[in-house]
Image: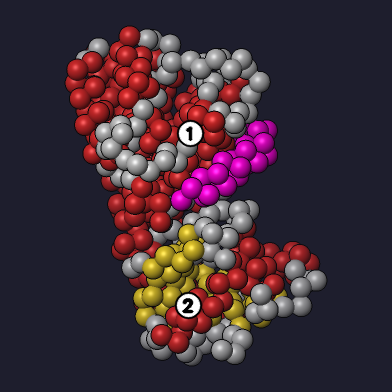
Amino acid sequence: MSKATVGIIGMGDMGKMYARRISAAGWRVNACDKPNRFDALKEEFGDDSNIQIYADGRLVSRASDVIFYSVEAEGLEHVVSLYGPSTKQGAIVGGQTSCKEIEVAAFRKHLPEDVEIVSCHSLHGPMIDPKGQPLVLIRERATDKSFALVEEILSCFGSKHVYLTAQEHDRITADTQAVTHAAFLSMGSAWHANNQFPWEMNRYVGGIENVKCNIMLRIYSNKWHVYAGLAIMNSWAKLQIRQYAESVTELYKLMLGGHREELEKRIKTAGEAVFGREGDSHRELLLRDDVLDRYSLGNVPKKRARNNHLSLLAMSPHGILGISSLTFSSQPFRLWLGVTEYLFRNASLLNEIIETAIEDNTFRSDDLEFTFAARAWSECVSFGDFASYRDRFENIQKYFEPRFPEATRLGNEMIRVILAKT
């Protein structure tokens, strides 16, 4: 195939990553962002002769054969309405948002009928090496030749291609990413409310706690809109996040009331439905003790405290955590799945957790704040309140910011271990 010209509308962190890698693979790239960023982008990319910075998306749309919209889900339709009508005849257009049904609807509404549609979604952040990571491709309206061209362009990432419809993408994303994000956002909220840096406390020691702390910091080190768009604009995500908050609340009430039998039945029945009974599976655990204990942020004594792990137990009633989800999953989800599987497939640890939940009050105040936080995030999402979501996220982000570099390094190491097993 002859080299096509690739357009990128939206030069945030992800747009820049796409531009640089596609350019390095030998494709001509036309790119733009908001008009007030034109001069800064010209200066930043001035040394790359393969990348042409334009003043706005109309010029990019008219000059490009394949165009990727790399903008926030909240503002996508507005941007497409501005620049979509100027799309070059016969071009191929796609987007990078995490909400594909609204994305495809915007394209069908505002693009000329002679324009083809092939969307994508890289399931990783812009600072992560895309090699081996899942890259979803959605063929909405395209010929075989056009779809092959998009695949050829994106092959420079070395990612693992996953083929879905827009609806399949959004449902699976809600089942995996949305609830995972809600869990860790709630953890950060709870620790912030209690004025805690958990990795500096004797109570949060050991493998599972290491993973909790690292992924929480990893999520809060990103930009708020990465999570807000998925949570608020994906209808399935709203339902899953609400169900998670309800599960947290119900489990916490069982713990407070001392209802051991009901708590144990609920937890073990749900866990067996997802992971099977201990010993049923011949597959090695995604994470083991020697892996979990390797990635500690703090320097506290290495004596594990008994924790009821409310945030993990609340995932089980969904029935969403399963090994089959690994084909299409984000990095935090893989880690979350690893520690959850570790818990539910270890009968002695699970019994210890249930005993702790009923008899030990050590984590009661932490669990109270976590329950408040899970409900608050769910309400924020249900109301579709982007402003409140951003305020809540960025306030907590500032609190944990000093530990982001170390958490990112350790998180990347854990990801490499898990990727080697899946």
**Residue positioned 54% across, 31% down in the render:** 290
**Residue 83 in sight from this viewpoint:** no
Kindly indicate whether the residue at mark 1 contacts the one at mark 2 (C-beta within 8 angstroms): no
Q: Look at the picture and state if 66 lies above or below 322.
A: below
Give SS at disc 2: strand
The residue lying toward the viewer, choosing from 100 and 308, is 308
Q: Quadrant of residue 256?
A: top left
**Residue 3 in sight from this viewpoint:** yes
Read off the magenta span.
397-422
The residue lying toward the viewer, choosing from 288 and 108, is 288
Residue located beneath label 2 in the image:
93
Q: Position of residue 204 (x, y in %)?
A: 52, 20
**Residue positioned 52% across, 58% down in the render:** 133
Most common SS among magenta residues:
helix
**Residue positioned 43% across, 75% down in the render:** 118
Q: Look at the picture and state if 65 lies above or below 292.
A: below
* Magenta stretch: includes residue 283: no
